[in-house]
Amino acid sequence: MDDITCPQCKTLNQPDADSCNDCDSSLLVGKLTSLGIGVLPKGFVWEMRPGDLSLGRNIANDFVIPSNLIAGEQLRFVYQGKGFSLLDVEQKSRCTVGGRTINDATKLRDGDTIKVGVEEFLFNWSGADAREVPRVDPLANHLQLMLGVISEFHTSLNLQEVFNNAVDAVVRLTHTKRGYAFLVDVRADGEMELVEVAARRTGGKALADEDPSGYTISQSIISQVVSGDEPIVIEDAGAQQVRTDTMLKFKLISVVCLPLVTFNHRTGKKRVMGVIYCDSPMPTGELPKHCRPTLQMLTQILTATIVKWQNYEKMETLFNTFAHSAAALEQDLAVVQKDIEMLQARVSEPDGINKISTDEIHSELQTLNARVNTAVTSLGRLQANQ
């Protein structure tokens, strides 16, 4: 979610702010409460702040439901000053408000029941000047987000989706504005090189290259994380008195860099296989105490998922090589069989013009021997790839 504009004084506030920094008005204008029908527990609450909000399976949504029965982005809550209207983004008539199917933008009223797939929610509107909306335990929200992350990782169709989802999750958890994922590639000369595999911005969108001449990120911080395998979290560079040349040049205030660490059980050694880097020109504010363990858990899940996908891709390559070798062997054997049948036919010919001579038999046998050797070579490739 983007920064929140206070309905009273129009001041910009952090996405998770409860009250306006300037006029102290409440920014909690409503809530969605799960009725416990589906994967979400009964009584689970999502806070609603003034601004457009999205609900769906993908982690980039404001409200994440880890269920394959929910579309990537299923619903959009459009803020209209004195309430929300609801849009069915999927447009497959699977969502209702008060029992009525959503076809166009539907104005929500306090006490409406929203059904999406098998999930059901109670919508309550309070407004910025009404009674205070009960606070939600942020740990419960983070755990719910982690369920969404795990679900997305397991249903990802390829490794690129895994990287995108991971960066989206870190950007969201840390309230930064953009993020990158890099893998460490060791070149033939032994030098390490960072390869970008994902570039994202808030809202789960791809990040275009802002500067063709180079990255506008703190590469020194990335180097520290790669060499030291420990995360670096800078919530407010001014307050923490941590500034690099790049941070000063590009006016970066908040930086989060997390290592993706693998562990070799045979050697007992750790290796940084990549990093997730996120930053923002604004302070993120102090991250909740449970946020850091959540980030650590996220990187562990991501690392395990990457290794799984890399092993899968290796097995897929091996299978394709095996299939190609098997097809070549089958073709070689078919040619050998055909040549043997032709040779037998010519040997069986009565004396005459088609009768094969001894020299010709010798020549044909040499040809057959060469083709058999080719088939043996193909068989050897198959055995080597097992």
Image (cartoon, rainbow, N blue to C red):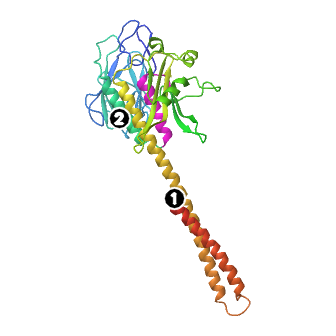
Residue 11 position within the rendered picture, expressed as x and y whole percent measured from the top left? 45, 9
Tell me whether circle 1 and circle 2 mark residues in contact (CB < 8 Å): no
**What's under tag 2, amino acid-wise?**
Leu
Q: Is residue 71 visible in this depiction of the protein?
A: no
Q: Which mark is residue 99?
A: none
Q: Residue at x 43, y 41 (%)?
A: 305
Residue at mark 1 to residue at mark 2: CA–CA distance: 38 Å
Q: Which mark is residue 385?
A: 1
Q: Nearer the viewer, residue 186 or 147?
A: 186
Magenta segment includes 176: yes
Q: Residue at x 51, y 24 (%)?
A: 221
Residue 191 position within the rendered picture, expressed as x and y whole percent measured from the top left? 58, 36
**CA neighbours of label 1 inside 10 A, class few (<14), some (14 to 19), many (20+):** few
Eye-nearest disc, 1 or 2? 1
Q: Nearer the viewer, residue 224 or 292?
A: 224
Which residue bears the numbered disc 2?
147
